[in-house]
Image (spheres, rainbow, N blue to C red):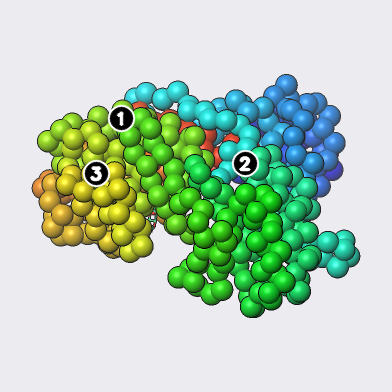
Amino acid sequence: MNPVTIESIDHEGRGIAHADGKVIFIEGALTGECVTYSAYRKKGSYELAQVGQILKSSFMRVQPKCAQFGMCGGCSMQHLEAQAQVAAKQRVLEDNLARIGKVKAETMLPPIYGQAWGYRQRARLSVRHVLKKGKTLVGFREKNGKYVADMQHCEILTPKIASLLPLLGELNESFTARDILPQIEVAVGDHVDVLVLRILDALSPSDEAVIKQFADTHKVQFWTQTKGPETIVPFYPLDAPELSYSLPEFNVTMPFAPAEFTQVNSDMNRLMVSRAMRLLASQPGERIVDFFCGLGNFTLPIARSGAQVVGIEGSDALVKRAGQNAEYNGLSDSTEFKAMNLFEMDVAGLEKLGRFDKWLVDPPRDGAIELMRSISAETAPQRIVYVSCSPSTLARDAEVLVHTQGYTLKAAGVMNMFPHTSHVESIAIFER
Ligand SMILES: C[S@@+](CC[C@H](N)C(=O)[O-])C[C@H]1O[C@@H](n2cnc3c(N)ncnc32)[C@H](O)[C@@H]1O
């Protein structure tokens, strides 16, 4: 295979080159580098490949911190200097807005950075006893998705959870049966670290004893899940503090249950909420809606500003939690929560909700196109602050807002919620 020069990197952090009339996506290669590669998938117009020799190296290449980098599916950009990762994500955002949305922000906001390592407070870890290795592996899936990465440590999980990975493997080894625990869900709060054990069969008394001992030694709280999410219950210790995170700038504390959606990186979440609040600039007396409100992450800070807020969310459990959190923070009078499938929104549905001065929208990866298409003269807010975890759906929705609904894209920017991964979290503000 002839060496190629990498022209840019794509939204998954792969180097892009051209050879023999095809586009080659090369994992592990950076812009400007000259590399050899080996293709693992060949199609008519493109190939997927692994980097081979790096004949000319980028000045932005750094030594990955993690020994499993390249194998583990948890990260894909550790070989690129941290600030350059953010610059690459900003380019992905701008490219998507231009290519898919045919829009350009009047201003690009400076990126928001949090800590580069040890930030990840939510994770789903796989557990597998591997006969050949004579031990249990606990960690993320390998890139191929089939195997569990052999992780002795992890640089992106919080340091405490990372240090427990091999010990959790040993815990599984000490169980009566080594195949009843396929998964551990991690939820780190301000005052407690929760590990939810997905259990396929009843734990024996000796299993229960070793779990309790582990909890006492390592100061974690175990929960168990025997079937669906409704079976997630605390196991030991039962008197641990409640899971919660705080947003001190808004004097808000958010209790949550381990399976409920919260942002994975609470430091970045604080910065993100702060930025969203500045862009929204909510005022006392305004009526504001928080679409896809979850447990009230933006709703309660908005309510703190004196505005009246309606939070709308698809999960009944989260709607209930958001109501409880409003009460917990003394904000029940200025908030109201509704359960609604927002992917089924239409013009009449929006009109029924009434007109809001401003919208905060924070959808899942699918975006919020039905909402954007349903805006009418009766419901159009003056300002929309859109928080996105997928630049392509943000761009698609921006196209509707700008080219059909008469909005201007005032500003957009990236927030580095997931360092070393290719996930791009961003924020955009639209005005009419
Ligand atoms: C990216 S999360 C944001 C949650 C919240 N804003 C936060 O910051 O914690 C997206 C939310 O959309 C909700 N959701 C997903 N599909 C939905 C739908 N079809 N209708 C309404 N809400 C939905 C999820 O339950 C989740 O709470």
Query: Does 214 appear above or below 231?
Result: above
**Distance CA(mark 2)–CA(mark 1):** 30 Å
CB under 8 Å between discs 3 and 2: no
Q: Which quadrant contains ligand 1?
A: bottom left
Earlier in the chain: of badge 1 and badge 3, it is 1
CB under 8 Å between discs 1 and 3: no
Mark nearer the viewer, 1 or 3: 3
The answer to whether residue 431 is left or right of residue 223 is left
Residue density around tag 2, few if under 14, some if 14–19, many if 20 or more, within 10 Å: some
**Distance CA(mark 3)–CA(mark 2):** 31 Å
Quickly name the residue at label 3: 330
- The three-letter amino acid code for the residue at tag 1 is Leu
Residue density around tag 1, few if under 14, some if 14–19, many if 20 or more, within 10 Å: some
Quickly name the residue at label 2: 158
Quickly name the residue at label 1: 279
Query: Does 222 appear above or below 266?
Result: below
